[in-house]
Amino acid sequence: MSASQMSVNREATRRRVLLTLKKYSYLIAMLPLVLPPLLLAAGHAMDLVNLFSWGVPVVVFGIIPVLDMLLGKDALNPDESTDVTRMNGEMFYRVITLGWVAGFAALLVWSMLELASGTFNLVGGIGWILSIGIVGGLGINVAHELIHKDAKLETRVGGFLLSLVCYAGFKIEHLRGHHVHVSTPGDASSSRYNQSLYNFLPQAYARNFLNAWKLEAQRLERKGEKAFSWHNELIWWYSISALVGIAFTVAFGWLGAAFFLGQSFIAFTLLEIVNYLEHYGLHRRKLDNGRYERTAPEHSWNSNYFLTNVFLFHLQRHSDHHAYAKKRYQVLRHHDIAPQLPAGYAAMIVIAMIPPLWKRIMNPRVEAYYRGEEHQLAS
């Protein structure tokens, strides 16, 4: 065997070992499901329950960004010819996402029981709802992975998870709206240059719901069905949301309703904040024929920090996801050509909530991308 062949074999072995280690690192994505029980146990042990009820946002938006910087970036890409087929066939990756949904459903019920038991005072209860809502927001990312797949089990489980946070319209609008119109003025989930988060959010809430209904009505019309019929999947998903909300209200009164609606609002708000930062200021150029250029890696902000990547099932490799929407999370690739965020999503979410700071950091990056064609910034 030649020296060059030995070198190739060593590199292939090294990559496979690293991919195996990374495979099990995705178990970190299960951490949000155990964080509330762990924090509550710590709160009881230290007699600081109401303080520790706020622990999830501290971990997600405080500790994780610091660890991101310490652990660094992850440039490891699976080899298309030798790794992707094998990795796609491994059940481990699917079990994690499907198991996440079951875990969240159980967490939702347990969290409500803890709230109803009188464990927290008013401030602690608000922190508890915020914490569970953040877990639900991370769950929407799991649902996002599932609804993109062809298997009915995965798409239905993804829809069910979205129903638990009252945002089932995302299942339709994201697939048939966002992925078609991404980085154009017609997309409800693409923020414009110089648009603040607080201007974006109300529009995103409304357009997500309205666009989902419009797209589903159009689908049914093409099939000769009426929008108000059992064929409309939105009616099914929103019915699940309503039933869960009613069950919580009947069982726990106004507190049950406040908990279910409160955690849902936090969850889908977190989703829309992520939407805000994923495509901020990036536009598909309008061609002479009036159409927009094809979606490319340059139309999504990426971040390749290792910890947040495994924590979010590779959501930060967003360019590859838009290029190959059905690709499973474990085989998404990093693209150097894609514009890069200066930090992981966890840190960027905090920055986005402070518009002057966000614009100071992000606007120069957008302007640099469009240098020489500044007219694109107004599109």
Image: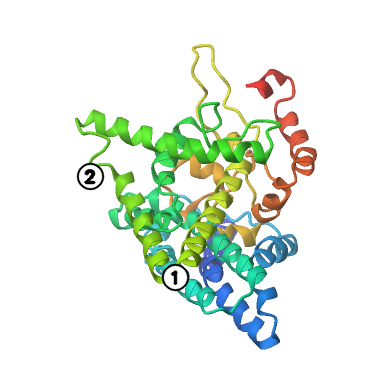
Report the residue that reaches farthest toward the front. Answer: 253
Image location (x, y in percent) of residue 189: 54, 37
Q: Judge from the rendering whether residue 3 lies leftward or rightward of residue 169; answer left or right.
A: right
In this figure, which residue is indicated by the disc labeled 1? 252
- Front residue of 135/251: it is 251
Q: SS for tag 2? A: loop
- Position of 284 relative to 200 (above/below): above
The reply to whether the C-beta atoms of the residues labelled 1 and 2 are less than 8 Å apart is: no
Q: Judge from the rendering whether residue 115 lies leftward or rightward of residue 374; answer left or right.
A: left
What crowding class fits label 1: few (fewer than 14 Cα within 10 Å), some (14-19), or many (20 or more)?
Answer: some
Q: SS for tag 1? A: helix
Name which residue lies at 39% across and 64% down: 98
Q: Which is closer to the viewer, label 1 or label 2?
A: 1
- Front residue of 17/163: it is 163
- Position of 90 relative to 318 (above/below): below
Image location (x, y in percent) of residue 296: 54, 33
- Amino acid carrying label 2: it is Trp
- Position of 257 relative to 27 (above/below): above
In this figure, which residue is indicated by the disc labeled 2? 230
Residue 7 circle label: none
Image location (x, y in percent) of residue 265: 53, 53
- Position of 223 relative to 57 (above/below): above
Residue 322 visible at all: yes
- For residue 278, which quarter of the picture? top right
Image location (x, y in percent) of residue 48: 70, 81
Image quarter hosting the C terminus: top right
Name which residue lies at 58% across and 73% down: 35
What crowding class fits label 2: few (fewer than 14 Cα within 10 Å), some (14-19), or many (20 or more)?
Answer: few
Name which residue lies at 75% across and 30% down: 368
- Front residue of 260/160: it is 260
